[in-house]
Amino acid sequence: MAKLACLVVGTGEYTTGYGLNSAKTDKSAGVIMLTLFELRKQGLVGDLHLAGVQGAKLPAIRAHMQRAIGEAYPGSAFDLSCSTYPADGATDPLAYRAGLAAMPRGSAVLIFTPDDTHFSIAMDAVAAGMHVLATKPITLTLSEQAALAAAAAAKGVLCCGEFHKRWDPFYGDARDRLRKLGDLSFFTAYMSQPKIQLDTFKAWAGKSSDISYYLNSHHVDYCEWVMQGRGRPLRVTAAAATGVAVVRLGRPCEDTISLTVNWENLPSRNVAIATFVASWVAPPADVHSQQCVGRGAAGARAPLTLPATDCAPHPPTPPFPLLLPGVFLPWRTRARPPWTSATAGFPPPRRPPAMPPPIPSL
Ligand SMILES: NC(=O)c1ccc[n+]([C@@H]2O[C@H](COP(=O)([O-])OP(=O)(O)OC[C@H]3O[C@@H](n4cnc5c(N)ncnc54)[C@H](O)[C@@H]3O)[C@@H](O)[C@H]2O)c1
């Protein structure tokens, strides 16, 4: 059987490691192409295709992958060959379509481009009969997401979001524990990257996407995953801080965005709060992506915390485990088993005035 062909759309920091600050980030070898080269070595994928917009960058990108992957792991004997689009020197935002045409139906398309482009590229890939893995956020609006889900279902192809926290064993373990602790009371997440990311992302930061879509999306999805089948968000309010990015980029751009989400636990209808704060104006620190996650639950005696750490997926190092654990300290939890009624004797919770209808499942 022919091995799965893959087209990666986007040639930036996350796919190839190539960018303005490639020497300074934790992803100088990229993540996606490196992983695909390893999967090909393991015999799991076949032909690889890589599509960007500016063909003028492609010779430098190939040289960067040779240096950061080929020469950095000399014993690994990676086959770094891949077809690239557009032609060297040409500029074409639709060059990925040539990559789609070069693969058989049922191949895989991995989309790692600026957030406002995911939807149209994914729709094209689905229409061509390809399976899709799109980075978070898959789309910028719920209506686009519903349209994409419907198109994928009609074509009988898979279309998934790359919320990689869900594959992190520490986050998975934490979810299992959190779901045993009764109603959510509060959830808080903070995630930041250093100011140099504003240079790396200057093509789109503040223009077509923002720091909340870029970083908060991780923990918004994680909170949804923890609460799956146990509650629903009622309302979202957001606030932003400005001052640093606007000077660095010379255009309006938020530095930090906070979201406060009111959740309704079901069936109790107790109301919880979740706050998500994301920033790209952090000073350089011990790790590239600072983050901290905490959660208070009805059944927990102490809040659960994931201490500040960097748990972005690190490029695999030989012998290439594909899921590397982060460097979390152990969970600090002493759950009260099982949760009895901590609210006994209290009046029933006040309902928010206007309840939105349940969110239709996609
Ligand atoms: N950098 C990270 O750590 C990281 C981690 C997880 C997910 N992501 C996500 O991946 C996406 C890309 O991030 P990045 O860090 O690589 O950004 P980047 O700005 O370094 O690269 C974006 C790339 O997309 C290309 N591009 C733009 N429009 C395109 C089109 N129509 N067709 C093909 N290529 C196109 C650009 O030429 C550029 O090479 C974003 O959605 C981001 O949220 C990034």
Image: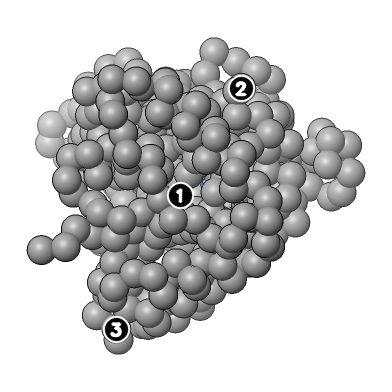
Quadrant where the N terminus sits is: bottom left
Q: Earlier in the sequence, mark 1 or mark 2?
A: 2
* Residue 360 visible within the image: no
The answer to whether the residue labelled 1 contacts the one labelled 3, judged by CB atoms less than 8 Å apart, is: no
Q: Nearer the viewer, residue 144 or 352?
A: 144
Q: CA distance from mark 1 to mark 2?
A: 28 Å
The three-letter code of the residue at mark 1 reads Val
Does residue 199 sit above or below 311 in this rendering? below
Q: Nearer the viewer, residue 332 or 361?
A: 361
Position of the C terminus, as image quadrant, is: bottom left
The residue that label 2 is drawn on is: 24
Image depth: mark 1 or mark 2 in front: 2
Which of the 4 image quarters holds residue 193?
Answer: top right
Classify residue 78 by image quadrant: top left
- The residue positioned farthest toward the top in the image shown: 286
Q: What amino acid does circle 2 point to?
A: Lys
The residue at the far bottom in this view is 154
Secondary structure under tag 1 reads: helix
Picture residue at 12% right of the left edge, 36% below the top: 338
Q: Marks 1 and 3, Cα distance to the nearest angstrom?
A: 29 Å
Q: Mark 3 highlights which residue?
A: 155
**Is 168 on the left or on the right of 95, as rendered?**
left
Q: Quadrant of residue 38?
A: top left
Tell me what residue is drawn at x 75 percent, y 56 percent: 207
Tell whether 108 sits left or right of 205: left
Circle on res. 220: 1
Q: Residue at x 28, y 25 (%)?
A: 76
Q: Residues within 10 Å of mark 1 (few under 14, many from 20)?
A: many
Inspect the image, locate mark 3, and give the three-letter code of the amino acid beneath it: Lys
On the image, the x and y values in percent for residue 64 come to 54, 33
Q: How many numbered marks, from 0 up?
A: 3
Identified at 32% across, 39% down, the residue is 79
